[in-house]
Image: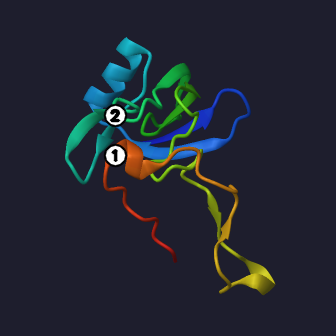
C-alpha cells in the first residue's frame, strides 16, 4: 500500500513509499520507518545506510485501510530523498501559462552527497 511520509516539525511532504504487511509491522514494532521496495522486492529500513533514520511520531491509516501516513522526525542530515534532497518532491512542474517549461528546483542544494553515502548515486530523472 502507498505510504505518505511527512515531517513532524513543519508538515512538509518528504516522500511517497510503499509498505507491505511486514514493513508496516516492523514500523509499528520499532518506531522507525520501514518500506517495501517494489523494484528490489524487499523490505528496507529507512536510513540504515544513510543515517537518515525516520523516527515515527504518528501513524495514520485511511478510511479504506489501504494507505498509510507516517509523521516522522528524520535523523542524520534531516534529508529523506536518496538523491540528497530533504524531500523527494524537490522539483515543481510548471502549470498554466508556464506549462512545458523546465522543472523548478524548490530546494537550493542537496542536504548530503549521495555519492559519498551510497557510492554510485542515481541521477534524478528530468521530465
Identify the image quadrant of residue 98.
bottom right
**Mark 2 and mark 1: span between their CA atoms?**
8 Å
Q: Disc 1 marks which residue?
A: 118
Residue 2 vs 35, above or below: the answer is below
x, y percentage for residue 42?
21, 40
Residue to which mark 2 is pinned? 49
**Which coloring applies here?**
rainbow
* Residue 76 drawn at (x, y percent): 52, 28
Q: Residue furthest top?
A: 29
Residue depicted at 26% across the width and 27% down the height:
22
Q: Residue at x 29, y 36 (%)?
A: 20
Asked if residue 9 is positioned above or below residue 121 in the image, the reply reads above
Q: Is residue 93 left or right of residue 53?
A: right
49 and 7: which one is in front? Answer: 49
Mark 2 secondary-structure assignment: loop
- Which one is nearer the viewer's eye here, 69 or 119? 119
Q: Image quarter for residue 108?
A: bottom right
Q: Position of residue 8 (x, y in %)?
A: 66, 27
Q: Tell me the residue at 60%/36% (across/down).
A: 6
Amino acid at each position: 500500500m502507498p505510504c505518505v511520509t511527512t515531517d513532524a516539525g513543519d508538515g512538509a511532504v518528504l516522500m511517497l513509499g510503499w509498505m507491505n504487511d511486514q514493513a508496516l509491522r516492523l514500523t509499528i514494532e520499532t518506531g522507525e520507518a520501514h518500506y517495501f521496495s517494489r523494484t528490489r522486492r524487499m523490505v528496507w529500513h529507512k536510513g540504515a545506510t544513510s543515517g537518515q533514520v525516520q523516527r515515527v511520531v504518528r501513524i495514520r491509516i485511511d478510511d479504506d485501510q489501504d494507505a498509510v501516513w507516517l509523521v516522522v522526525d528524520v535523523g542524520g542530515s534531516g534529508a529523506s530523498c536518496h538523491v540528497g534532497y530533504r524531500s523527494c518532491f524537490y522539483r515543481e512542474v510548471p502549470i498554466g501559462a508556464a506549462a512545458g517549461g523546465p522543472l523548478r528546483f524548490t530546494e537550493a542544494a542537496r542536504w548530503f552527497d549521495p555519492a559519498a553515502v551510497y557510492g554510485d548515486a542515481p541521477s534524478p530523472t528530468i521530465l
